[in-house]
Image (tube, rainbow, N blue to C red):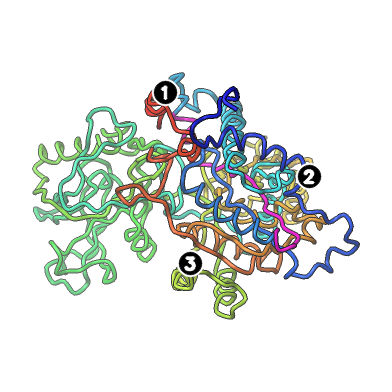
Amino acid sequence: IDQLNFPPTYQPKYVESAWQSWWEKSGYYTPDISKINDVSSIKEENKFVMVIPPPNVTGSLHLGHALTTAIEDTLTRWNRMKGKITLWVPGTDHAGIATQSVVEKRLLKSDGVTRHQLGREEFLKKVWEWKDLYGNRITGQIRSLGASVDWSREAFTMDSNLSRAVTEAFVRFHDDGLLYRDTRLINWSCALQSAISEIEVDYIDLEGKTYLPVPNHKLKDKYEFGTLTSFAYKVEGSDEEIVVATTRLETMLGDTAVAVHPNDTRYSHLHGKYVIHPFVDRKIPIITDDVLVDMSFGTGAVKITPAHDPNDYSCGKRNQLDFIIIFTEDGKIANNGGKFAGLMRYDARIAIEEELKVLGLWRNKEPNKMRLGKCSRSGDIIEPMLTPQWYVNCSSMAARAVDAVRQGDLKIVPEFHESTWYRWLENIRDWCISRQLWWGHRIPAYFLRLKSDLDKGIRQDKNDPSNNHLWFVGRTELEAKERAVSKLNVDINDIILEQDEDVLDTWFSSGLFPFSVFGWPNNTVDLQTFYPTTLLETGLDILFFWVARMVMMGLHLTNTLPFKTVYLHAMVRDKYGRKMSKSLGNVIDPLEVINGCQLSDLLKKIDEGN
């Protein structure tokens, strides 16, 4: 026995190394339905089906994933031991923004190049290389944890069959009148040069003057936030002035009105008159607005920048104001910004303040409490931007999802999360599903131009809202052409189509996961046998970002709830109360908890970190 040289303590890697491969090879995790003549005859109580919350391919698993795996494996093995037909489907998510962000950072750090320098095709090759490397790491970790998933049904959200489901869902939503294109204010990350959803925005509360770093800004290490700057606009044709205040001084380049309250007698004589913009050739009208303006606050006058502020956007719509976009996609002042064109937006903030002082228009600056939105992926300060995007009207789907819980068809455990479910779905807004990225499912929409128009020098702007009728949706380019012919009565040979360069929000494909993994929209044996699933188990943090969307999309596209029960577990957090996040760098590898980790390896991870 001594000659066997047994280690003094239990060593999992020696004992468990062969078990997973043997279990997998023996097919113990794959349900045998070959002897069942009619799969529809399988009673619900005799089967247990669950899909794994697909982890992102942006690195490796962490303790939060390990908790999910442990809970779900326990549920799966318990039901399997009860003699049920049991299936637990594994998979990974392409994670559009997260993956592209990580790969871009790595390329910049290792090769000193950006994705734009590489070009779309070469960049996507790099992302697929990343996926092949880290996707395998993730599945290897799940195997090492002993998870009893059916690897023969492993799915990836960019697989051809799942991509086909994404295209089908987009087309069906469009044909059902729920999906449309519109130009609205959205959350914009200048660092990513893309719209992002609320889930990718972290909010910080500033008590007053605060200095923060901003990506891609190089003139200073940190920039000033949490202040309210007051400056004057001169009234045209007089010595009078109107003083306004703002926390975002750079946006004054896009001002198209100064609003006052209609009952404010201080400004009654100025109604309908103009102020002169000091930096660009623009007269700005003085308008009245009793919705936006509080005449008891400050000077009672408000600068209006409709293209870069949500409240101002609404005011601009009410008063038919001009919407002037003053930022480029990467956060520079656009060509319409006068002498400040080309400056990064916060460098322009400093320059504008100095110029206002020179002109005698600067009045003061004081600390101001404010809430600041930051991109969770890049750390960039969120910029409200007026851009054309694709939207899904979720109202009817959300109502069905609410009714499903209220009527007891869908059970949420623990029950107290139902209030979150109702609150979010009953106040749902249309879902912006387009992202200005390269990694993801490219939007199956095409902009039409006619060869005959181009020959005449006529070229329609695809971003002009008045040309939205020239966008056509199709499962293929040919189908889009046929739809264009039918609608516009034009010669198919005269048509030139240009596919939208944007991709879909990752949550769009994730929302289809419970049925796309079984072959939907095709009526496969797997879909007939295993859909709807039994249970959805996941962390409480994505109840409305993922779970609600699966329920809405499942109900609309399959007319069936994708699962009967949602079980939400608590979160693994760090000492600051933050959840595990690769972008924060606070993750712990579950395999290192099992096997330990050398200090040199930990230091290497820090050096290679985001």
- Spatial separation of the CA atoms under disc 3 and disc 2: 40 Å
The crowding category of the residue bearing disc 3, from other C-alpha atoms within 10 Å (few below 14, some 14 to 19, many at least 20), is: some
Residue depth check, mark 3 versus mark 2: number of the one nearer the observer: 3
Residue 524 at x, y percent in the picture: 81, 55
- Is residue 321 in view? yes
Extreme residue toward the top, this view: 111
Residue drawn 58% across the image and 52% down it = 53
Q: Amino acid at mark 3?
A: Ile
Q: Secondary structure at mark 1?
A: helix
The crowding category of the residue bearing disc 1, from other C-alpha atoms within 10 Å (few below 14, some 14 to 19, many at least 20), is: few
Chain-order first, disc 3 or disc 1: 1
The crowding category of the residue bearing disc 2, from other C-alpha atoms within 10 Å (few below 14, some 14 to 19, many at least 20), is: some
- If the image is split into quadrants, where does the C terminus sit? top left
Residue 585 at x, y percent in the picture: 38, 38
Which of the two residues, 575 or 515, is positioned nearer the viewer here?
575
Chain-order first, disc 3 or disc 2: 3
Residue drawn 66% across the image and 48% down it = 148
Highlighted magenta segment, given as a residue range = 81-105
Q: Are marks 3 and 2 in contact (CB under 8 Å)?
A: no
> Which disc number belongs to residue 339?
none
Chain-order first, disc 1 or disc 2: 1
Which of the two residues, 393 or 585, is positioned nearer the viewer here?
585
Q: Was residue 394 drawn as part of the magenta stretch in this picture?
A: no
Q: Which residue is mark 1?
A: 109
Q: Which residue is mark 3?
A: 428
- Spatial separation of the CA atoms under disc 1 and disc 2: 48 Å
Up/down of 446 relative to 456, above or below: below
